[in-house]
Each structure stands twice: as structure tokens, then as C-alpha cells.
Amino acid sequence: MRDIGEDCRDRGTEMDAYLNLGMVLQIIKEYQKANLAFKRLLQVAWSTDNYQMEMRAYEMMGLQYFYLGDIPKAEFYLKRSLFGKSEAKTNQTRHLATSEYRKAMEWADNNSSCDT
């Protein structure tokens, strides 16, 4: 599912894939792996300026940290989601994450077999 979104440049499908993958990993109690999927979701959400998916990523990351017993991180991410606190577009972490993502997508676009 993730490859479809990446190969065809459909970022909405890609975000849905990361969200669903993370939720499945959560169900089977693979919380660290789930968090990786949600972090990737956050990266794509930042790159596409998708506020709703950014908040969903924070919520899901907070839950994973809760299940892992890291209450301070859980509280941090759950509060971000609850209060709708988006990361500033000028934030260095966001800038680095989005530039790395865009480089990867440029490469994928140049090596894609999609007709879009």
C-alpha cells in the first residue's frame, strides 16, 4: 500500500498507508515500529502542509509512548494533538525532515513508472 502512494505521487494515499500500518503495528503491540510509521506520517504531513494528519500523527505517537511507558513523551505529543499545536514551518527539525522527504520523493518521481 505504501509503494502505491510513493510510486504514483499520491501523498494522501501515502499518509493513509502510514497511518494504517502504524495502527496495525499498535494492535500487535509493536509500539516502537508503530511509532516509526507515525513519524513517517508526520514527515509527509509536514511536507504537504496537512494539519489534520500532523495532529493525528502526534496523537498516535503519544499513544505509542504511553504504551512504551514513556509518560513525559506521551504527554508532550498528546497535548500537541489535543491543543492543535502545529510545528512552526520555520522549525529546524521540520525543515530538515521535509527537505529529506522531498529529496527522496524527487528521486522516486524521477524513477517512477506512473503516468501521473
Image (cartoon, grey):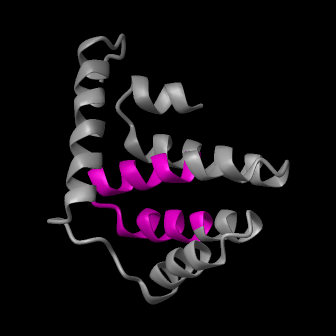
- Quarter occupied by residue 111: top left
- Quarter occupied by residue 49: bottom left
Q: Is residue 12 above or below residue 42?
A: above
Whether 59 is among the magenta residues is yes
Q: Residue furthest bottom?
A: 83
Left/right placement of residue 58 relative to residue 116 reads right
| Residue closest to the eye, 67 or 38 | 67
**Which residue is at 41% across, 23% downward?**
7
| Residue closest to the eye, 40 or 52 | 40
Q: Is residue 104 visible?
A: yes
Left/right placement of residue 29 relative to residue 6 reads right
Q: Is residue 49 above or below residue 43?
A: below
Q: Is residue 23 above or below residue 83?
A: above
Q: Quadrant of the C terminus?
A: top left
Q: Is residue 48 visible?
A: no
**Which residue is at 41% across, 83% downward?**
84
Magenta-drawn stretch, dominant element (helix, strand or loop): helix
Q: Quadrant of the N terminus?
A: top right
Task: Give the tally of numbered discs.
Answer: 0
| Residue bounds of the magenta highlight | 37-61
Whether 72 is among the magenta residues is no
Residue 88 screen position, x and y as percent: 22, 71
**Which residue is at 39% across, 42% downward?**
11
Q: Is residue 110 above or below residue 75?
A: above
Residue 28 screen position, x and y as percent: 85, 48
**Which residue is at 52% across, 67% downward?**
56
- Quarter occupied by residue 2: top right
Left/right placement of residue 33 relative to residue 59 reads right
Residue 14 screen position, x and y as percent: 47, 40
Residue 36 screen position, x and y as percent: 56, 46
Q: Residue furthest right?
A: 28
Q: Residue furthest left?
A: 90
